[in-house]
Image (cartoon, rainbow, N blue to C red):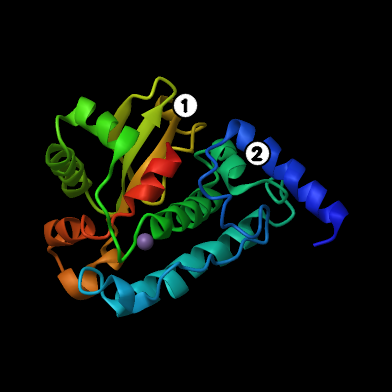
Amino acid sequence: MDKRTFLKTSALLTATALWTPDSLLATETQVVSPFTLPKLAYNYADLEPHIDAMTMEIHHSKHHQTYITKLNEAIKDTKYEKESIEKILAMVDVKESAIRNNAGGHYNHSLFWKLLTPKSMAPTGKLLASMQSTYTNLDNFKELFGKEALARFGSGWVWLLIDQQQNLSIVSTPNQDNPLMTTIYKEFVGKKPLLCLDVWEHAYYLKYQNKRADYIKAFWNLVNWEEVAKNM
Ligand code: MN
C-alpha cells in the first residue's frame, strides 16, 4: 500500500469508527465493496467436537460466500456501492430485501467467526462485572441467552447488546437481520453487539439435527470472551 492509499484508507477507517460499531474493521480487508470472505483465525476442524469440520466448511465457504456474492451484486451501481458494511446496514430499508438479507448475512457471519475460538477462556474484568451486575452470574446469563436462542422461531440470531449507558440486553432477530439495521429497528439505535449466535439450521443440522438446545450448550465451549470484551 503506498502512502497516499494508506492515508486515504486510514481517514476512511477513522471516519467510519466515529459513528459505527468498529468490530469488523480490524480484520476486514475490504472497507467497501466488493466485499470478500474473511479468513478464519482457526481451521475448520479446530472447533470439534462442538462444531464439526464439515458444518464449518460449508457454513463459511458456501453460505457466507453466497451472502457476499449476492451483496456485491445487489449494491452494484447503487448508492450503497461505496459504503462500509456498517453504513449499509444502518441505511437499509424494509423494501430492499436483497441488500437487507445479504448485508446482514455478511456482517453477522463475519462477527460470529471472530467470536468463536478453540481456546475459550472464561470472561474477566469489566465484561464479567457487567454481566454479573445485570444477570447475577455467568451461568444465569447463559441460561437467559440460551432461552432466547431456543425461542427464536425459524431462522435468526441471538445477540448480547450494550447501549451507551453500558446497559446490557439480550435480544433476537429473524433471518439475517441484526441490531445495526436501525432504519428498520428503531429500538436498536445506540446499541451495539457484543456477542451473537447463529441459530439457522445450517449452523448445526449436520451434527445436532433438530436438537438446537445441544448446539447452544456446545457453543459455550467456544466463546471467545476476549473478543466479546473488545466489542465493549
Ligand atoms: Mn449462518
| Circle on res. 122 | none
Q: CA distance from mark 2 to mark 1?
A: 16 Å
Mark seen at residue 189: 1
* Mark 2: secondary structure: helix
The kind of residue tagged 2 is Thr
Which residue is found at the position 12% from the left and 61% from the top? 214
Image coords of residue 133 (percent x, y) = 22, 25
How many other residues sit within 10 Å of disc 2, few (<14), some (14-19) or many (≥20)? some
Name the residue type under label 1.
Val
Q: Is residue 142 left or right of residue 174?
A: left
Q: Residues within 10 Å of mark 1 (few under 14, many from 20)?
A: some
Q: Along the line of sight, which residue is nearer the eye, 219 or 97?
A: 219
Position of residue 186 measured from the top left corner of the image (x, y, whole percent): 45, 26
**Does residue 200 sit above or below 153 in this rendering?**
below
User: Residue 15 is drawn in which quadrant?
Assistant: top right
Residue in view at x 26 percent, y 36 percent: 128
- Tell me the residue that label 2 is attached to: 16
Q: Quadrant of residue 207?
A: bottom left
As drawn, is 101 to the left or to the right of 216?
Answer: right
Locate the N terminus by quadrant: bottom right
Q: Quadrant of ligand 1?
A: bottom left
Q: Where is residue 5 drawn, in percent x and y?
A: 83, 55
Image position, residue 212 (x, y; %): 16, 59
